[in-house]
Image (cartoon, coloured by chain):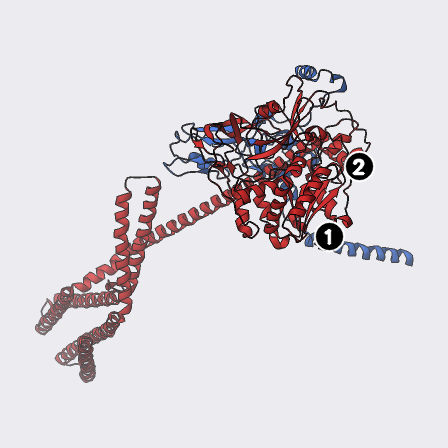
Amino acid sequence: MKSTVNMTHFQLHDFVGGIHPPENKQQSLNSPIADAGIPTQLILPLSQHIGAPSECLVNPGDRVLKGQLIAEAKGFVSANLHAPSSGVISAIEDRQLPHPSGMTGTCIVIDTDGKDEWIPHSGISDFLCAEPQVLIEAIQQAGIAGLGGAGFPTHVKASAKAEQIQTLIINAAECEPYITADDILMQERADEIIQGIEILQRILQPECVLIGVEDNKPKAIAALEAALADSKDDTHKIHVITIPTKYPSGGEKQLIQILTGQEVPAGGIPADIGIVCQNVGTAQAIYRAVAEGEPLIRRITTVTGNASTEPRNFDALLGTPVSHLLNKANTNMAQLSRLVMGGPMMGFSLNDTAIPVVKATNCIIAATSQELPDPAMEQACIRCGMCTQACPAQLLPQQLYWFSKSSNLEQATAHNIADCIECGACAYVCPSNIPLVQYYRHTKGEIKLADADKAKSDRAKERFEARLARQEREAAEKEAKRKARAEAAAKKQAEKKAAATAPATESAIQAADKGADLEALQKKLAAAKLGVEKSKEKLAAAEAEGSDKVEIFRSAVEKAQQKMKDAAKAIAEAKKAEKAAATTATDKGDPNSPERLKNKWDLAQGRLEAAQTRLAEAESSGSEKVDALKLAVENQTTRVSEAKAAYEAALAKPTVNAENQASQPAAASVIDIDALEKKVLAAQTRVDKASERLTMAQEQGLDTISALETGLQKQQQKLDEAKAALSQAKAQTEQTGHEVKA
Amino acid sequence: MIEIIIAVAVLSILAVLFGGVLGFASVRFKVEGNPVVDQIDALLPQTQCGQCSYPGCRPYAQAIAENEEKINKCPPGGEGTIQAIADLLGVDPEPLDAEHGEEKDSKMVAVIREEECIGCTKCIQACPVDAILGAAKQMHTVIADECTGCDLCLDPCPVDCIDMVPVDHGLAGWHWDLPTNIIATDKSHPQHHADDEEKAA
């Protein structure tokens, strides 16, 4: 869209608010960049960038060469760290960090040997034709983090999708007072900057590149223009844009607003609106890394302030202690009242001069007490509203102040405290000297903490509820198991009872088995019959003789008849039992019936499961029985499979069943024969009785002889019929028996 | 007379109409559960420590909402939680009930001295948020990120190998303090007067 942009016609925008503090830049611009030299000791914190601290790769006592990787990026949002000079690792220990907290953190300490011996390194010669991925890789390897002050790993920003990016903005505004590091870099190394920008262009493929420079740096602008004119780039996509001097125009969001008129959405990043913003120093570092293969081991740092008699910019190795730079700048330590790292607006005080220069250190201010006096006493807010007018982020600083003071985090969040860039403009204009930014920083920290606490307590709640649910489920499972066990026990009990009642049938079976018993009974019956006939004959003889013993014989006959009846009854009962046994035998008699096999299988399965649970328990409690139990489980498993196989085999052979069923009609015919035999017996008795009465009548010469004769004949007929039926039934039984055998 | 009848009829109809609307609304927009319980529960720190004598944060929230239990029985939440619940329920905040414990200055996390752990799993069973890992006769360890610092694992440990240590987030956990308020007349000797103030306090 802006490829046709002409610098003279470029439409600048403005951001609301902003301030014009005294610049104090000239002091350090009088001399060119000086090499800070190699200090005797370099202190390199593992966390010099935003993101995860890098991971140390060296050990105390190791000798490292200049440019050697000594700590590796841990994760994507992290950066590599290289040895800035050759020497020996003397310690890896906690040292005070260049951080407003004044906290300590892990640092790699290198005792330099002064040889400054490079590790072999080489750049990409035709970097403008290289693949973007190769270039990003080179940037990542070099451990470059934003040199503007925030220290965000550059390769992360460079990995934005190229098709998404329309504009690349190079931040050369350098709006904060005192700092001149970028200014002097542009003046002296503009060509490297332009080539670095060309590399970024190659990676991000933007439609245009805008270098935003404040109009208080005419020399830098001229140098950039000259370098652009000299450069091979003939696409005319790179434009140096002069913007009015106003603090904080160098803020990323403010610079974007000035150059494009677009606002980065709250909580978003510039890439959301198709913009990537890089610091001018970062562009130069990218050139050094890609073209020369030099990792990020040095940077330009301004040393200024009235306490230093020779304020200037130094090309300092990372890890150089601040004291070394202060010495180089000839600082009067007696006059030094406040040592600030960064600018006077956003920097922080250092309480120790041993603190090292890191990737983001753009300025050291050695201020006298007149220059940067102790903060004035805070007065009550008079609600003048000047802070609101100064706020470049269009927030309501006064409201945020009240909310911060009363710890009203909710309202502070609702009033977008997260969008505060902590530029300090509000505090600068405050007539009551309220350190507003510190309030906001505190509140931001509190909100972050509260959010983390909330997230943690939510997670704790979730875990607690999950645990309760799990316990409930386990209890339910236990209860279900207990019930199942109780049911199984009840079933077993019932089976036992059934077994206890079974003896009756079993005795029947025994009776049936003792077929000899039945035969004995039949013999008895025959004997009883014989006895009856004999006693009848004796009775008849006694009657005929008119003996006194008639009565005695009669009772003997009756007794004999009773015996015979008993015998018949016993036979009948025995046969019944036999029959019952026969019927039960069809169900229970066959041990190979599928039902039984199924039961066996189930039983084995249950045992196997029990054995397995016991084994698991033993294993969890580390018992010594584990091996034995394992063996038992294996045995049980084989038994289960055998039982299963047997069951399946039984199912496959229904003939076994059929045989059982075929034996049933045979049993039925047996019953028929029994009944017929009984009939025959009964008929026989009746015939006997009738003939007896007939003989008695004939002997006594009674009139009833003829009637008795016809009765006897009828009885005889019935007996014959019964006998015929019996023989027929027997024949049939034999036949079916043969069939079954066949 | 007719006017009175009309008035009565109109009012009756309106009464039936509104009754119907209200009845429908009470069915249609019925709120499941007691929303106050959820609100109180959200304010509690969810350490599930049981120091309030309830088995977890939610039961305590329920007791506050339904049985008018006192709101000052949560030591992990401390004054902040008491104030928040007081604001929510519109009651007067009370000082923390010392009977249930004291508010700690910093968050704590349990740490097992692993070489002393005998692997009895008792702490695992006691942990309300399943933040302890381990198995029988194996060394246990605490997942520090999930530990709520509730102390419940301390008592069951037969060898007392669990320590409660303050959580240290290092640089990432640091944030700026509030500016110290000193009055204008202290300007000449801020440090001196700050000391005096501390003494006075």
Q: Position of residue A639 (x, y in %)?
A: 26, 55
SS at badge 2: helix
Task: Specify whether B130 is left or right of A199.
Answer: left
Q: Colour of chain B?
A: blue
Q: Amino acid at mark 2?
A: Gln
The residue shown at (65%, 19%) is A332
Residue A605 shows which numbered tag? none
Q: Residues within 10 Å of mark 1 (few under 14, many from 20)?
A: some
Mark with earlier residue (2, 1): 1
Q: Measured from the top left, where is residue A569 in percent x and y?
A: 21, 67
Query: Along the line of sight, which residue is nearer the eye, A367 or B12?
Result: A367
Q: Is residue A139 left or right of residue A484?
A: right
Q: Position of residue A55 (x, y in %)?
A: 48, 36
Q: Chain of mark 2?
A: A
Residue B79 lies, with reference to residue A563, above or below; the image says above
Residue for badge 1: A5
Q: Chain of mark 1?
A: A
Q: Which residue is mark 2?
A: A389
Chain drawn in red: A
Q: Residue at x 52, y 47 (%)?
A: A124
Residue A245 vs A669, above or below: the answer is: above
